[in-house]
Structure formats: structure tokens, C-alpha cells
Amino acid sequence: MRLAYLGGPLLVTAYGLTRLLDGIDGSKGPGPAWTVGHLFFLGALVLLAVAMVGLRAERRTWLTTVATVGGVFGAVAMARVVAVDILVARGAADRAEMDRNYATYEFPGSDVLDEAGGILFPLGLVVLLVVLAAGGRLPWWSPVVALAGFGTILATLDLLPVAGLLLLAALAPMVTGTARSPVAVPRR
């Protein structure tokens, strides 16, 4: 789980930095920076989905189950978007050709799926962190920092490196030993 808790956020940061480098010439994609950056993000989504499963294991309730299922579904939906981004850039001469290639991967409801992924993924992760913080397993600030991370992404995608570092801070207590062990409830 350490890899998921640390690697996911660090790959978000790597994606954000690569994305900024890709835009130096005034256009994002196509090219190696576009592909490498999106591969970083794909890896981040996989690791953060694993992290959500690990967080659920810390406290198994109906709410953590729903948050995990929704969050993992959101990560898969977002991974589809990332995979399409990689595919449309493959062999494209410029951004205009990439934009034309997107139509190849659209299907009825794909826009709804894409939007759902962008909502369910962060919502699932934040709900898991809230439940663990409310139960005393994580510090109170952990879900707040994660929410701030997702908020920076909503402000502008150029803040993705900052968002990754905020997610790293939010999940770090699960790795650093500062997360508290669950308290055993005595039976009567």
C-alpha cells in the first residue's frame, strides 16, 4: 500500500510537470511529452484506485464501500479519457489533427461517463478520508488537504503539480506512521 499512497500522488505531480513542459511551445500535444505525461497520469489513477481500496480496508462500512466503488469507477472512467488522449495523439501531426481524431472514440453517453469519472473519483477519495478522519484514524486535516488538491485542479490544470503534492500530504499519514491505529471496542 505504501507504493499506492505515495506513488499515486507523485505520479500526479510528474504528470503536471510534464504537462507544463509540453505547453512551453504554446501547444499541448502531440509528441513524447504528451504521451509520457499521460502515462504518468494513467499510473497515478491505477495507484490511487488501489489506495482507495486500502483506505476502505481500514474501516469497512457501507459508506466506505460505496465511496470505494464510486471512486474506483471514477478512476476507470478517467483512465478511459487518458487512454483516448494517448490514442488521438498517436501519429497526429499537430493539435488540429488530434482534435479531429477524438470523434473516433466517442460513443453515445461517453461525455456523461467522462463527467461522472471526474466527479466520482475525487468524491470517493475525499469521502474515504473524511470517514477515516472522523473515526480518528487520520488527522482532521487530511481530507481538507485532499479537497484543496482537487480544488486546485478545478481552478486550472496548470496547478496539477501542486495538487499532486497536496494529495501526497493528505495520504502521507498512512505511510509515515502518523495515522492512528483503529481503536478496539471492548465487547460486553
Image (cartoon, helix red, strand yellow):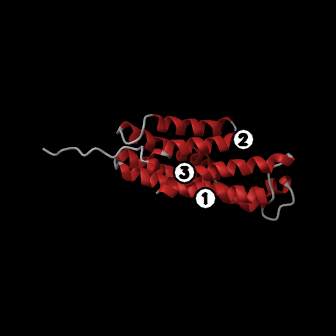
Q: x%, y% of residue 19?
A: 74, 49
> Given the current orientation, which residue lies at the most extreme left position?
188
Dot placed on the residue nearer the N-terminal end, 2 or 1 = 1
Give the left or right position of residue 88, taking residue 109 as reference.
right
Front label number (3 vs 2): 2
Q: x%, y% of residue 66?
A: 42, 48
Tell me the kind of residue under disc 3: Gly
C-alpha span from label 3 to label 2: 22 Å
Residue 188's disc number: none
Q: Residue at x 37, y 36 (%)?
A: 134
For label 3, the residue is 74
C-alpha span from label 2 to label 1: 19 Å
Q: Secondary structure at mark 1?
A: helix
Q: Secondary structure at mark 3?
A: helix
Q: x%, y% of residue 60?
A: 34, 50
- How crowded pointer 1 is (Cα within 10 Å; few <14, some 14-19, many 20+) is rated as many
Give the left or right position of residue 35, taking residue 48 as reference.
right
Q: Are marks 3 and 2 in contact (CB under 8 Å)?
A: no
Tell me the kind of residue under disc 2: Asp
- How crowded pointer 2 is (Cα within 10 Å; few <14, some 14-19, many 20+) is rated as some
